[in-house]
Amino acid sequence: MAEKQDPEQDTTKAHAFTEPESPETYETFGLNESRLVRRIDLIVLPPVTLVYLLSFLDRSNVGNAKLEGLTDDIKMTGDQYLTGLTLFFIGYVIFEVPCNVVLKLWRPELWLPTLAVVWGIVATLQGVVQNLPGFYLARFFLGVTEAGLFPGIVFYLSMWYKRNERQFRVALFFSAASLAGAFGGILAWGIAHMKGVGGYNGWRWIFILEGLLTVVVGVGAYFAIQPYPTTAKFLTDNERSLIYARLKADSDSTADEGFTWKNVAKTFTDIKVYLYCLGFHTMALPLYTLSLFLPTIIKDLGYTSAQAQLLTVPPYSLAFILTILFAIASERLRIRAPLIITSSSLAILGYILLLSDHTAGVSYLGTFFAAGGIYPSVALVLAWPVNNVSGQTKRAITNAFQISIGILGAVLGTQLYRTETAPRYYLGHSFALGYLGANIIVVSILWYVLNRENGKRDAGQLQASESREWLGDEDPRWKFML
């Protein structure tokens, strides 16, 4: 439980939101701050990163399964397959915000592992479906059960790290998405050799083995994922005090904020929240179409199914490296918008190559630029509101709302890569190109809005509140990260 403040205490310092108290102040705890942060990184980040890697693997391995006979065995048309992909995102959108409400009311060390175990079971059951309705049902409930994970982890990390530290940590665990793409291709290539084992085709074993892996890791996550700092057992009392002191000087993470619908409503009356949502919406379409259709896109360039599974690995590996590099640059330079614009421009170049040149080599090169540009932009876009939204409930709901609006782009994207447009997929590639251009426009507008808001506060146009109550990101003392 967060420490109660003295009613007579001036809370201006507690919510100054510029720089925290000097490191020398922390020497009173007998601890080194940077060493403590590294310890938190080693204990808090790996479990949630691994769980997120498996979630992205379980949602995107359907593209690998398609190459191994999924559509033929279930006897579904190309349009029916696309409908199954869409149903996942519909379930995801519907349950995104409710899941983060549950997180705010419950405990992360129980909620996040429970999600992993349940969606792992659903992912495993995809491997035994016998007909189209079963496939549809499995995809929908996979979306339902995965819905709370990403926004839940983002909110969870915001309770451990200072504002300027969150960007890199969010990007680091999101980089697991690109790793999932790389591992997914290798795993699918290997598992496909199990064709005939137990009378099952290779695609069934892809779902079964990867789903069971998630269940096992989910059970282990009950022991690995930590609660919030106030009750985490791996911390000493001095370490807990140090975390409290550094967060208190920097953000609202130590506030004892109860859940109220008034705080929920603040999410939906802030224009900046809608811009954060549009920022992800314009990235979700290229992100998910690439992750779902890359094996098929590469196969249609003239490669065999086995070759296509392995050829997905290099573009995702590049995406992983660039995601980390852009995150490091963002943390050190303390900028978001310019790097998002740069990364999205790189992805635009990739789709121009995919659309303009029909040779396999150039088109394959285009997938490198596309993946290498999309993943860093998505990581930066998703971490932006974590830095800028204050008020615990508002931040939790904003994280979920951003994903919900963003995923609507994925819903559209799943209907664009139709078999009749193969192998060039002009419709899908063109939409992805247009969405990336729209992302640059939205990010530029948000950059302007945040900069203007900071300018008003610097100029004193927003008068400091006379109330001792902290007003979240509406407070004149709050500065937005650009």
Image (cartoon, grey):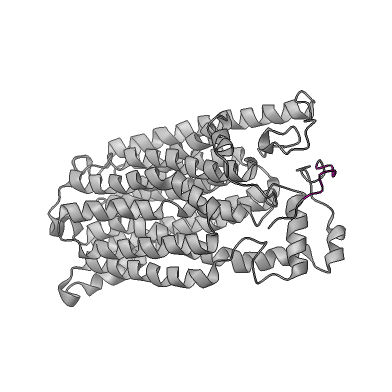
Assign the N terminus to one quadrant of the image. Answer: bottom right
Assign the C terminus to one quadrant of the image. Answer: top right
Image x and y of residue 187, in percent: 34, 68
Toward the viewer: 312 or 49?
49
Q: Is residue 399 left or right of residue 284?
A: right
Single out the residue that lies furthest toward the top.
461
At 18% from the left and 68% from the top, the residue drawn is 201
Q: Is residue 90 left or right of residue 394?
A: left
Q: How many marks?
A: 0
Toward the viewer: 107 or 461?
107
Toward the viewer: 11 or 410?
11
Say if the magenta span includes residue 148.
Answer: no
Say if the magenta span includes residue 10.
Answer: yes
Asked where in the image residue 190 lies, by quadrant, the reply is bottom left
At 47% from the left and 73% from the top, the residue drawn is 220
Image x and y of residue 79, in percent: 19, 43
Is 42 above or below relative to 361? below
At 83% from the left and 66% from the top, the residue drawn is 29
Q: Would residue 302 be seen by someone viewing this image from the given angle?
A: no
Where does the magenta region start and end? 5-11
Single out the residue that lies furthest toward the left.
75
Q: Would residue 129 be seen by someone viewing this image from the given angle?
A: yes
At 41% from the left and 57% from the top, the residue drawn is 56
Image x and y of residue 215, in percent: 38, 69
Is 135 above or below relative to 278? below
Q: Assign the magenta stretch its main secondary structure.
A: loop
Single out the residue that lies furthest toward the bottom.
198
Toward the viewer: 97 or 130?
97
Image x and y of residue 360, in percent: 30, 50
